[in-house]
Image (spheres, rainbow, N blue to C red):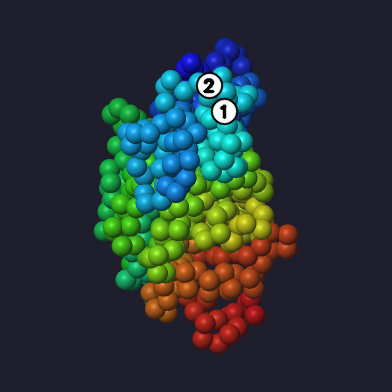
Amino acid sequence: MSEKNPDNGAQEEPGRKVTRAVAQIRLIKQEFGGEVEIDPGDWADVGYANRIYRAGSFLVRDRDVPRIRDLFGRERQEDTFDGIEGLTRFQPPPDFNVDVLPPGPNLTSKYIAYADAQLGRGVARFDDLVYVCSVSPCPATEPLEVQPAVSPTPAPVGGNCDGRGVKVLIVDVGWTKTDKHWLAGVTGEDEHPYSSGTNIRPYAGHGVFIAGVLRCIAPQTEIVVKAYLNRAGAEFGFDLVRKLEEGLGENPDLISLSAGAKTGDGSTLLAFEVFMEHLAERKGVLLVAAAGNDGDREFFFPAASPDTLSVGALAEDLHNRATFSNYGSWVDVYAPGENLVNAYLNGTYTCTEPPHEHEVRTFSGMCRWSGTSFATPLVAGLIAGRMSVTGENAKEAAAALKSFAGNRSISGLGRTLLPSDACASTEVHKCGCPPKPHC
């Protein structure tokens, strides 16, 4: 007996109040359609989603594929999808008897519950959608208009800690060439930012802004922006780590990722577990990841994974956590992430999220934006800056910056870093004490 995946798209009634989360999930549904399932299925009614994942298949480690095949009655290689070494996506056969499955909100969750019961919890895992937007949105706001001649903030940092000789891979929606001088030499994959004419697509320009923040901190850093999240700012974890493996062919020192996902039950993302095991074989290469923008302490992956450097956002006053930033002991450092100004696109943008839905904004190459998305490249820039003068690899430089940040911890929050700290932290390296006024 077979069962079709229900389209749990939660049809919305006219006049219903739309939350930001619902507006963002709609973008995901428009792009991915029946490829995704959403928990809970009535997300439009409750106004949020706990989890978004690939419909009809799930992830397993390669070593567990034989047991999964036996359980679901598949024996042929074409029943699986190759990912990276150690990771496989498995799709049960269409003639599998679904009557043996336990209750669940959708077919994929039933498959996983069945595998949990028969083989042990965690053998089969959801192929979660990793996103720049939706559910745990990053950025925390849509881009805001600024005057065309406005200067970037944080302002470009001078000094020898300029990132010279360091290469950063920015994993995002892609790259659009800009005339901003601080972004000269940045390369990347085209994000196709316009839906028509000069109408800017939702979350287009996200990678441009991120590259701009990083270059303001470490202006000589070599940056490559990849369009790995160019489907409504999202991609399934399985597909994303395959692209990341390809991206390692660029031989980066650092990877900056302003995206992630919540899993609803606190479980990690299996795709990133396997990828991080591969990354550990690359001496000194570090993944810097955004902590997400729910304003709570629930784990957001891969930022909450042990071997990443997770970055939360400070408020504009630099003394408090930005209200949107996630927090908790799993967040390694906090950096400015509210109302930053940097390079963007030229054109008009129509807002998709309440309370500004349908508002049209006009941009001339710059914008103001908020989110842990933008605190993340700031910290990546600090690491690159320190590396360029100390000769440390990315993991060593990040560890030294974390130690330095501990001298300026905010009570009840944690370690903080500011735009000028790359060079300041090298003084600690030399003398063992942070420079004034922190010491």
Marks 1 and 2: which is nearer the front? 2
Q: Nearer the viewer, residue 254 or 153?
A: 254
Other residues around mark 2 within 10 Å, as few (<14) / some (14–19) / many (≥20) = some
Q: Position of residue 398 (x, y in %)?
A: 50, 69
CA separation, marks 1 and 2? 9 Å
- Closest to the observer, 396 or 71: 71
Splitting the image into 4 quarters, where does residue 205 fall? top left
User: Which residue is outermost to the bottom?
Assistant: 431
In terms of secondary structure, where does tag 1 sit?
A: helix
Q: Which residue is at a point 59% across and 61% down the rendered structure image?
A: 332
**Amino acid type, label 2:** Val
Label 2 near label 1: C-beta < 8 Å? yes
Where in the figure is residue 315, as x and y percent of width and height? 61, 53
Q: Which residue is mark 1?
A: 110
Q: Is residue 181 left or right of residue 304?
A: left
Residue under the image location 61 percent in, 30 percent down:
48
Residue 318 image point, x, y percent: 62, 59
Label 1 crowding class (10 Å Cα cut-off): few <14, some 14-19, many 20+?
Answer: some
Q: Is residue 158 visible?
A: no
Note whether residue 93 is visible.
Answer: yes
Q: Which residue is mark 2?
A: 98
